[in-house]
Image (spheres, rainbow, N blue to C red):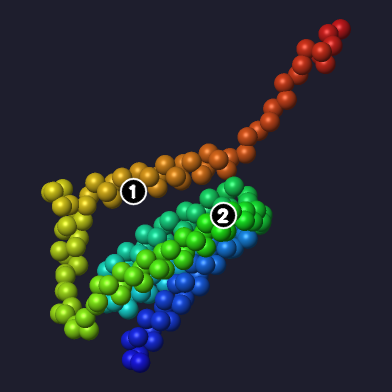
Amino acid sequence: MSASAIIFYVIAAFLLGTGILAVTAKKIFRAAIWLLLSLVGIASLYFWMAVEFVAAVQIIVYVGGIVVLIIFSIFLTQQSGREMPGPSLQRIIFSLLAVVFGLAFTHKLIIDHGFDNAVSQPFKVAVSDIGLQMLSTTEHGYILPFEVVSMLLLAAMVGCIVIAMKSKQTTIPSPQNTEEN
């Protein structure tokens, strides 16, 4: 087995482990931390595939943006130390069935596809070309999705702040309690 295959299997095991821990953690803050580590594992997979720009975007956008926003939201709602309720038996059974079906379906696709061992030429794309395509307003440009995602993040952040704000309970004196002399 080559060193490249060993590195891939280590990254894959790390991704599977952190992904499972992210969805099975009892505390919401720990689930967010496992999600963060899982996204870092995906970035390492991109680095392993020699797609450094996508790996950097993965780290900046998802690890640096989305997960940090999730962690701030958890802290703002003051639920970071609280345990989440356990899943019901029905949900566990359906989850296991989905995993088994997904693995069987994926295995069937891989076996039927019959990947060849021939290595094609690695693709080389300049970062400047990627940047121009992302900022392009032409038919295949990506400026509109980036603007929509930024608006979505802004709306999520405002929503988190509104939910986390403590409402001041003001007591209004009732007419029965007030005595006029």
Q: Using the rendered view, name the quadrant where residue 26 is placed.
A: bottom right
161 sits left or right of 56 in the view: right
Q: Using the rendered view, name the quadrant where residue 92 is placed.
A: bottom right
- The residue that disc 1 covers is 149
Give x and y (percent) for residue 153.
Answer: 40, 47
Give x and y (percent) for residue 147.
Answer: 29, 46
List the single residue furthest toward the left: 138
Query: Mark 2, residues whose alpha carbon is within 10 Å: few (<14), some, or many (≥20)?
Result: few
Q: Is residue 110 above or below residue 1?
A: above
Q: Quadrant of the C terminus?
A: top right
Q: Which residue is more in the foreground, 11 or 32? A: 11
Q: Secondary structure at mark 1?
A: helix
Q: Quadrant of the N terminus?
A: bottom left
Asked whether residue 43 is in view, the answer is no
CA separation, marks 1 and 2? 31 Å
Q: Is residue 150 above or below residue 131?
A: above
- The residue that disc 2 covers is 91
56 sits left or right of 24 in the view: left
Q: Is residue 147 above or below residue 17?
A: above
Q: Is tag 1's residue or tag 2's residue first in the polypeptide sequence?
A: 2
